[in-house]
């Protein structure tokens, strides 16, 4: 694969010089290309390399014990091959780059490098881009949703700053002076609201400075009592929707669902969630915007593996320290039809079964039977997200009759039909290409460009290297 490389197009990433970056040099990619050839006479390979991860699309040996040595050797070989690329990414100040490599039998290669740019989110499946953001700064509907008011919400009967302070001092004797009233007031000013009374007691008794051996020892002693690591007071923050960043492909398929019996609102974030602790990667917060059956000041857990909603932990901080746990009685956010519906082999049988005035998100997946019509969805007032696997729609142009869509994910052929007919819904804020079935990454990139161009957004940047 040695030889002179020809750079057909180079994005503006040369740090003010005319010389090609190392990222655009064939020598940087040669170890990866050799690994991708993997004994094949000719092939097309694709993947993604980032500063801290990579996906080369290679088949790895299975996990059972006899294959572990071979698997480890393969992973080590991949790590060595991508190291020059990762170094070049750091040099160029780029987080990651996707690639498509056409490897010929005579040893030559054509390497396509793809930088998504500001209008495309990071993808999670090899060389395929993530969602295309058609409106700059647009957010999925759940991330625009504010908490519903709950008139008459009060603290739990168990909530008692006095009892909380007594328990803390009994269980943490000699803990120290804690945090001063002025420091607690300053934290409230930074957050834009006073700290709730129980939370203020927590910090006045325990404190939680960032530095110092004393602070560390206090935090270690307090963790078993609280069931979490207490954040430093100046690290306490409001877990509003902006603090729970998520891409469109995940956010658009989520939904805010808060039933009449729910104790926690099923939000992406809330200005009333004040985070004070960390446990196993999750965050604990005092909740000042409870659900219809919840209490002011209840303690909730924000699961780091979930993009929306929170779980009730205790009715109050007093209950948390006393070891009394609360119980949520409502359904988990987004799990209840008719707001979110899935039509597939294991879900609903057809689109008509999903059609409901409350429907917001519809996913059409793999199923038996003929492609389906979308006629039953026309006129639904809240439908905002539609995703459909390739070949599941009888007439893709019916999508144009769904006048409230803000996110749409379709297969390559379905998108081509809409683009050719000029029928891409004008209401879309974001879109994505469904990659089930492993379509050609360059075809997906071309569709991404077409969608971006349709809205006047910067196209995917490309470099083509031959050598």
Image (cartoon, grey):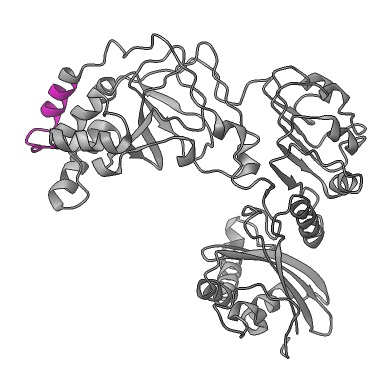
Is residue 56 something that shows in the picture?
no
Residue visible at 46% across and 12% down in the picture: 292
Choose top left, top right, bottom left or bottom right for residue 65. Answer: bottom right
Is residue 317 something that shows in the picture?
yes
Q: Is residue 162 left or right of residue 259?
A: left
Highlighted magenta segment, given as a residue range:
164-179
Image spot of residue 406 (x, y percent):
70, 36
Note whether 204 is above or below 96 in the view shown: above
Note whether 168 is above or below 260 in the view shown: below
Residue visible at 65% across and 78% down in the picture: 24
Assess whether residue 172 is covered by the magenta stretch. Answer: yes
Note whether 294 is above or below 130 in the view shown: above
Farthest residue toward the front?
A: 456
Image spot of residue 296 (x, y percent):
35, 18
Image spot of residue 203 (x, y percent):
19, 34
Farthest residue toward the bottom?
A: 3
Residue visible at 41% across and 22% down in the picture: 289
Note whether 17 is above or below 215 in the view shown: below
């Amino acid at each position: 694969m040695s030889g002179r490389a020809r750079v057909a197009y180079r994005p503006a990433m040369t740090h003010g010089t005319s010389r090609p970056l190392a990222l655009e040099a064939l020598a940087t990619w040669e170890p990866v290309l050799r690994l991708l050839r993997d004994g094949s006479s000719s092939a097309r390979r694709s993947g993604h390399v980032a500063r801290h991860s990579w996906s080369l699309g290679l088949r790895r040996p299975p996990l059972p014990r006899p294959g572990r040595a071979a698997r480890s050797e393969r992973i080590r070989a991949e790590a060595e091959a991508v190291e020059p690329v990762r170094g070049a990414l750091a040099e160029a100040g780029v987080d990651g780059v996707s690639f498509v490599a056409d490897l010929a039998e005579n040893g030559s290669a054509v390497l396509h490098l793809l930088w998504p740019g500001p209008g495309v989110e990071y993808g999670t499946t090899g060389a395929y881009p993530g969602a295309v953001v058609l409106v700059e700064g647009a957010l999925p509907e759940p991330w625009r949703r504010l908490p519903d008011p709950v008139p008459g919400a009060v603290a739990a009967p168990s909530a008692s700053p006095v009892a909380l302070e007594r328990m803390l001092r009994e269980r943490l004797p000699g803990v120290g002076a804690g945090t001063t009233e002025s420091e607690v007031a300053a934290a409230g000013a930074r957050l834009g609201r006073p700290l709730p009374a129980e939370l203020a007691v927590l910090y006045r008794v325990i404190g939680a400075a960032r530095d110092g051996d004393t602070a560390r020892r206090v935090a270690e002693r307090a963790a078993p009592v609280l069931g979490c690591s207490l954040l430093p007071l100046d690290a306490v923050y409001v877990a509003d929707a902006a603090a729970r960043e998520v891409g469109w492909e995940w956010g658009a398929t989520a939904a805010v669902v808060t039933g009449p019996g729910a104790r926690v609102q099923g939000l992406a974030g809330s200005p009333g969630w004040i985070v004070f602790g960390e446990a196993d990667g999750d965050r604990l917060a005092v909740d000042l915007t409870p659900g219809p059956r919840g209490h002011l000041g209840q303690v909730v857990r924000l699961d780091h593996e979930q993009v929306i909603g929170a779980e009730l932990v205790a009715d109050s901080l007093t209950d948390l320290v006393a070891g009394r746990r609360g119980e949520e009685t409502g359904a988990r956010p987004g799990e209840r039809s008719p707001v979110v519906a899935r039509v597939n082999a294991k879900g609903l049988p057809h689109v008509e079964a999903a059609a409901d005035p409350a429907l917001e998100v519809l996913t059409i997946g793999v199923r038996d039977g003929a492609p389906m019509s979308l006629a039953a969805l026309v006129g639904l007032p809240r439908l905002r997200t539609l995703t459909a696997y390739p070949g599941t729609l009888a007439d893709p142009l019916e999508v144009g009759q769904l006048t409230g869509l803000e996110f749409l994910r379709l297969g390559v052929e379905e998108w081509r039909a809409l683009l050719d007919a000029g029928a891409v819904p004008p209401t879309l804020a974001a879109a994505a290409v469904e990659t089930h079935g492993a379509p050609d990454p360059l075809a997906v990139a071309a569709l991404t460009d077409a969608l971006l161009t349709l809205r006047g957004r910067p196209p995917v940047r490309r470099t083509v290297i031959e050598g």
